[in-house]
Image (cartoon, coloured by chain):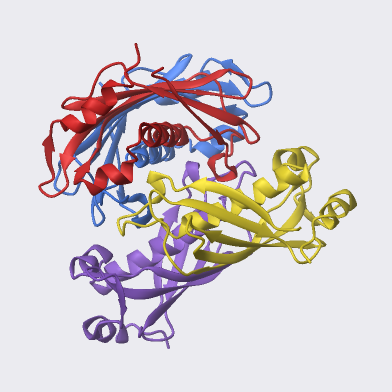
Chain colours: A yellow, B blue, C red, D purple
Amino acid sequence: MGKFEHNLDVRYYETDQMGIVHHSNYIRYFECGRMAMLDEVGLPMHKIEETGIMLPIISVECRYKFPARLGDRLKIVTWFNELPRARFTVMSEVYNQDGQLLVEGSVSMGFIDSATRRPIRCPKTLSDLFAQYLNQ
Amino acid sequence: MGKFEHNLDVRYYETDQMGIVHHSNYIRYFECGRMAMLDEVGLPMHKIEETGIMLPIISVECRYKFPARLGDRLKIVTWFNELPRARFTVMSEVYNQDGQLLVEGSVSMGFIDSATRRPIRCPKTLSDLFAQYLNQ
Amino acid sequence: MGKFEHNLDVRYYETDQMGIVHHSNYIRYFECGRMAMLDEVGLPMHKIEETGIMLPIISVECRYKFPARLGDRLKIVTWFNELPRARFTVMSEVYNQDGQLLVEGSVSMGFIDSATRRPIRCPKTLSDLFAQYLNQ
Amino acid sequence: MGKFEHNLDVRYYETDQMGIVHHSNYIRYFECGRMAMLDEVGLPMHKIEETGIMLPIISVECRYKFPARLGDRLKIVTWFNELPRARFTVMSEVYNQDGQLLVEGSVSMGFIDSATRRPIRCPKTLSDLFAQYLNQ
């Protein structure tokens, strides 16, 4: 429990002239994994934003082990080891169809009140919900 | 008068595994050319949007003659043959540093009131401004 | 028979500051639909390219009816009305989860020998395969 | 000496529905800064690749301080504190037109022989060239 999986196929436009997926796209794959996690938890991002909260990114780190290529079906694994407070750190791994780890990293988000654009703590309704899915 | 030029370099992430700029990026280059045109006219897009108007895209067409590659410095030529009314059609051409025509096309936009999200006619202040730059 | 369907979710990074999917991304959705069609036909693009053939884009046209938004699950419908010869024209439609037509368009591709980078006719093995899937 | 500056304007398609530049795009801005650095050094990336060397990305880290918005003219500052050996680490900062630091980070690349796809050390011709531009 606590690890979420999301599959996606490499898209042609995501490749570059090295013949592999451009490194910036894994940051986007991480986001796809986080969005799918929020969907599964029952709180998709567009619903969160409708409540007047935005989650801007504070930091990203990403280590590249092995390239993805066109024709690869990727598995994005997403989880979090700590409950969100002022920030929310989410871990990500990307595997190919052979189970090979391609990329791993983490992304930290903050919480912002959309109206004031000021930082807030993670609302209790969210952190209570996330508490059920903490990776342990 | 009436034709606007904007230069940009091919970016690495815009190439694909054919070793050329991915075709979807020329649609984005067209946009860069239009934005630079609006800057030159003295009415950058973010200023237009601050007045409560948005310009969603209605149609795009694009013909590809010759590929752009990494290392190319591109010239985007942008102009319009008719004043904006309910819609605004902008023509675009992309050339490389050798003066070779790579891509040509056009993009039509509408005008939307941001508050109501309803279509409006092009505001007179805008069409008066554009009238000075009509390609003839 | 003859129409292929592919589902995809709007990705956060595909939205723009109008709060809708940026128009350039539908060109990429079209491509996703074409790639899924090739997969279903049993001839994925990376396999085609391994045989030394590339399919560069010759023209694109796209008409935008209604915007896609974050949270939308899109259906890409893809088909072709004529067999590939010197070029291959593929039609695309994008629908949202309510069955509303968002965008329609077409993309024409050529065939290139990867080694010589010269145009060729569509190889018979490909056109024979496609003949089974012609939309009629 | 040793710090390179490159200016670029925020592009419309780089914004997201938070009304700011999507976080993944700064990874691409970093790349633009690195490519401009290579141009200035006299060794543009497409020339490096023509010699049979590719520079795949090994790791990225990025800290976000303040968002970029449409209408912003950004300055990308790029430098390196150590000469390339098995890997090459490049530092990046992104500032807006008010001199405000928006994002900072670093990217590490490896060196690969294009033919064998195997890691190599940074060729001496490259490291000798870079030695003149080391940030000190």
Residue located 16% across and 30% down the image? C124
Residue located 31% across and 18% down the image? C134
Residue located 18% across and 39% down the image? B66
D32 vs C27, nearest the viewer? C27
Question: What is the quadrant of residue A23 in the picture?
Answer: bottom left
- Up the image or down, D89 lies above or below C7; here it is below
Q: Position of residue B74 (x, y in %)?
A: 26, 47
Looking at the rendered image, the quarter that the C terminus of chain B falls into is: top left
- Up the image or down, C70 lies above or below B106; here it is below
* In the image: residue C40, left or right of residue A51: left
A55 vs D59, nearest the viewer? D59
Q: Position of residue D83 (x, y in %)?
A: 37, 86
Residue located 31% across and 16% down the image? C81
- Up the image or down, C132 lies above or below C41; here it is above
- Up the image or down, B102 lies above or below B11; here it is above
Q: Position of residue B16 (x, y in %)?
A: 32, 50
Res B135 visible: no
Res D52 visible: yes
